[in-house]
Amino acid sequence: MVLESTMICVDNSDFMRNGDFLPTRLQAQQDAVNLVCHSKTRSNPENNVGLLTLANVEVLATLTTDVGRILSKMHQVQPNGNINLQTGIRIAHLALKHRQGKNHKMRIVVFIGSPVAGDEKDLVKLAKRLKKEKVNVDIVSFGEEITNTDVLTSFVNTLNGKDGTGSHLITIPPGPHLSEALISSPIIQGEDGTGGAGLGGAGFEFGVDPNEDPELALALRVSMEEQRQRQEEEARRAQNAAGPEGAVTVQPIKEEPNEEALLERALAMSMETGEEAETRTAPVVDFANMTEEEQIAFAMQMSMQDAQDTSTDKKKKEEPMDVEEDGDYSEVMNDPAFLQSH
């Protein structure tokens, strides 16, 4: 967790009346400042933040850990005149020199939503001086990003040098929410990447600033907790109710195809084959409607059919023996020696 003192420089020029960022550039900047303040103080409770305006340069709040004080001063800012970037950064540097925690790193966050006036060489000299003093500068350029990109890029590159990465330039095109574009930026994430933990789209839980309306923030938090508990209880009841039913319905699906279904199918097939054999061998006869003579005649016919079947079976069994015996006797009868002996 980085110990850091941060001065936030806001643009309060007449250009901030424009509506390319909803509802205006000034109000979008207010939400972004809220986000930056909370990310800094939440990353380390000992971090402190100050506020300064760039048009008619004035320190509105010295370094403090009271974010509510910063936000109340920010809402009093009104558009007036043009910005003086160099003077504002120098005064912010002086305010950081008077920080109470001398072990705190120094950082300046500058919001620029209007054209930057002045010579680029003067900005480069200022950047070299800040680099010697080990001051990091993060710049959020919005609204006039096309005009200011070259000047601000050279300023940040001079601060970082060849190997430095402490200063950043964030260029944001026109859009609905300025703060949402900053959440994933290095300004919010910080050097260790944990600065944006727990922050919502507007920098506050449920989108409400607890410093401005603590009762509403508390009511929303309690309501959300009750709703979460209610949903968990309903999910638990549904799981308990569906558990036994699921066990009963799943088991037969696994067992029936393997045992019961196959056995029933085999039994049905065997019964069908038996019925077909019976219909072929024994035709159905209605004895109730037959007279005694017809019944006797049918019985005699069945007995004669059985006798014929048995005689045919015997003939089939004796035929090979008869052929062999006939063949044997013919040879004996044709033998002259055998006939003369008898």
Image (tube, rainbow, N blue to C red):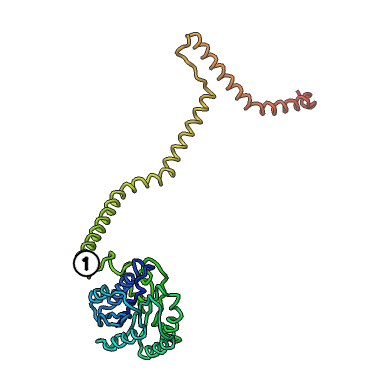
Across and down, in percent, residue 1 comes to 31, 79
Q: Is mark 1 on a helix, strand or loop?
A: loop
| For residue 154, above or below residue 218 | below
Q: Count neighbours of disc 1 (C-alpha within 10 A) and say few if under 14, some if 14 to 19, many if 20 or more.
A: few
Farthest front residue in view: 81
Where is residue 310? Give x, y as percent.
Answer: 58, 22
Task: Identify which residue, 20 or 288, lies in the foreground.
Answer: 20
Q: Mark 1 points at which residue?
A: 213
Q: Which of 302 and 133 is in front in this view?
A: 133
**Residue 21 visible in rendering:** yes
Camera-side residue of 227 and 63: 63
Relative image position of residue 222 (x, y in whole percent): 21, 61
Quadrant location of the C terminus in the rendered image: top right
Given the current orientation, which residue lies at the most extreme right position? 336
Residue lying at 25% horizontally and 68% vertically, measured from the top left: 209
x and y percentages locating residue 282 in the rendered image? 52, 22
Q: Which of 173 and 117 is in front in this view?
A: 117
Residue at x 28%, y 78% (from the top left corner): 44
Residue 105 visible in the snapshot:
no
Q: Could you say which quadrant of the image residue 30 lies in?
A: bottom left
Mark 1 residue type: Asp
Total numbered labels = 1
- Image quadrant assignment for residue 47: bottom left
Left or right placement of residue 95 versus residue 331 in this view: left
